[in-house]
Image (tube, helix red, strand yellow):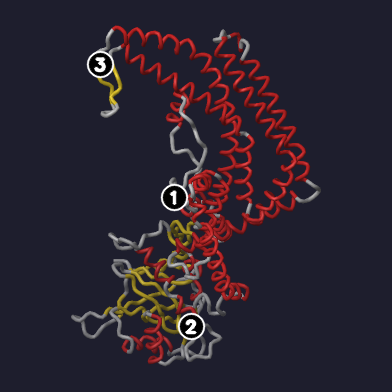
Amino acid sequence: MVLKIFFPQCCNRADSGLLVGRWISGHDSAVVLAVIHYPFIPGQVKQYVQQVGLSVLGSWSLPKEGQEGMESFLRDLSTIFPQQRWLQIRRQMGKTGFTCEVLNRDQSKTPPSFEEEKVIFVHYEQRKVMLSQLHPIESGDAKTDPPSELRQVFQTVALSQPLFFLDKYDDGPLKSTHWQSEGREASIIVELLKQASVPLCLLLSWLLSVWTWICSVRIFNFYPLRFLSTKLSTCVQLSYRTEHMKTLSSPKPAASHTQFMRKANMLVSVLVDVALGVLLMLWLYRDDHITMLANTLVPAADHVAKELDQLLQWLMGAPAGLKMNRALDQVLGRFFLYHIHLWISYIHLMSPFIEGILWYGGLSACLGLSFALSLLSDMVALFTFHIYCFYVYGARLYCLKIYGLSSLWRLFRGKKWNVLRQRVDSCSYDLDQLFIGTLLFTILLFLLPTTALYYLVFTLLRLVVVLFQGVLHLSVDFINSFPLFAVGLRICRSYRLAEGVKFRVLCDEPGVALHLLMEINPLKVSTVVQTYQTPTYSCYPRDSWLALVKKLFVGELIYPWRHKTTKAD
């Protein structure tokens, strides 16, 4: 078999010493993590290696002036550190490649001797491998198959952080070379944030507990308030943000990479959401933009009502040259015109308070842009309530006629709908039933075009409102679920999210082993978004397009509300 040695690039020019690392179980591979420099005391090396949970793999020799006997000394260390296999790696000055001899301690062979084996050196950048996460992430619940060799290499480097706490500036007896030999990476700002995060999390937890207690008051559990809290987008977004803050305020550290990324995505999402909301609030309260919006809102409502009035007058005549039922046409037209006049009266009655409502509603933007968009969606639903009423009236009347015609059509064929068995069964009808059914079928059939025209017009108006609300809901859902931290990590430090690795030949000189350079393949941006998007209460319709068209055809009501039971992961 071929022996693969994963060698860190930072140790290519390290001083002579001992190789510290770990053998990969189940594979003929070794991962070198650091080089402990000469001089050292073997007993201290053994104690230190046991503390960090690693082993001595062999020796590393880089000849220098005045160290002619160093290679033989390092060779003799194999008796002090008894290993089943001892690696003797040597590099000559001026050459790129290494030479490697392997000491196999076989019980049948005495004494043990160094042998030449087929060796491949795989050079890797230790810092990138340690900080990267190989995808797909394995779940810790059930492991049926053993991890692959590459995954074990990544895990070995990632779990060896205690080894990297020792740098060349320490006063200890041991000096080593690894990716942090020049000093550990640290940031004063990060350390201060870590110290300040604990009391901040405790304060947030207390505030959230108070808010949860207020929401659990019995008065909020009555049916009207409970129903509105599940239908209003603002209440849904508030409950969703409360869950986010509960997750972020937990002082417990993340137990896995997935939980860490989920918390980081939530934190960045909340911060960006609040920043955008503050910018929107600054724009609203600058140069009297709220007054301008309030002054244009009532004329806009009057214009919409005028257009609806003209539309109804057109429907009450001969729309597109169609001959409608005159009596039903007049009844429906006057009925809807009366609702429009009621709505205009309500708008003019509320006009003195609209500016105050917008002024106080704009303050919700300080909680985030998603709150402002949710409030805008609720305001659109409130100001277009008359269109919703028109749609419900037309849909109920149209649905009644459709189901009546389908039931009477089954009567002509000698069929009926079995409610208990949920199927169509045969049935015999007498002459009176058939006569009454024929009269009702004829009446409903000739009144259907008039009802269908009103239903079609108001359904189109309702779909325009639903489409606008859907865009707002999708924007809120995008802000809540988009993994900003993960995408930023993929753009700035692509090696942190690894999809795999690629190899290229680094050195293929005669007389030395083959040297390969292992480079990390970053995860695709689409895969990053799909993997790390935050679970959210989605506003996407649960029905397919075919089911949606069927509902529109038979007159069933279509609601754009987001239900808390439909949680998308």
Helix, strand, or loop for circle 1? loop
Label 1 Cα neighbours within 10 Å, binned few <14 / some 14-19 / many ≥20:
few
Residue at point 65%, 52% (across, down): 364
Q: Is residue 192 left or right of residue 560?
A: right
Residue at point 56%, 55% (across, down): 484
Q: Nearer the viewer, mark 1 or mark 3?
A: 3
Q: Nearer the viewer, mark 2 or mark 3?
A: 3
Mark before the other along the chain sequence, 1 or 3: 3
- Mark 2 to mark 3 CA distance (whole Å): 93 Å
The circle on residue 569 is: 1
The image shows residue 253, relative to residue 531, as above or below, that is: below
Residue at point 47%, 44% (across, down): 563
Residue 327 screen position, x and y as percent: 56, 11
Mark before the other along the chain sequence, 1 or 2: 2
Mark before the other along the chain sequence, 2 or 3: 2
In the picture as drawn, the residue positioned furthest to the left comes out as: 108
Q: Amino acid at mark 2?
A: Ser
Asked if disc 1 and disc 2 are in contact, CB closer than 8 Å, the reply is no
Residue 323 screen position, x and y as percent: 56, 7
Q: Which residue is mark 2?
A: 176
- Mark 1 to mark 3 CA distance (whole Å): 48 Å
Q: Amino acid at mark 3?
A: Cys
Helix, strand, or loop for circle 3? loop
The image shows residue 140, relative to residue 7, as above or below, that is: above
The circle on residue 427 is: 3
Specify the quadrant of the image occupied by residue 149: bottom left
Residue 518 screen position, x and y as percent: 45, 63
Asked if disc 1 and disc 3 are in contact, CB closer than 8 Å, the reply is no
Q: Is residue 500 left or right of residue 273?
A: left
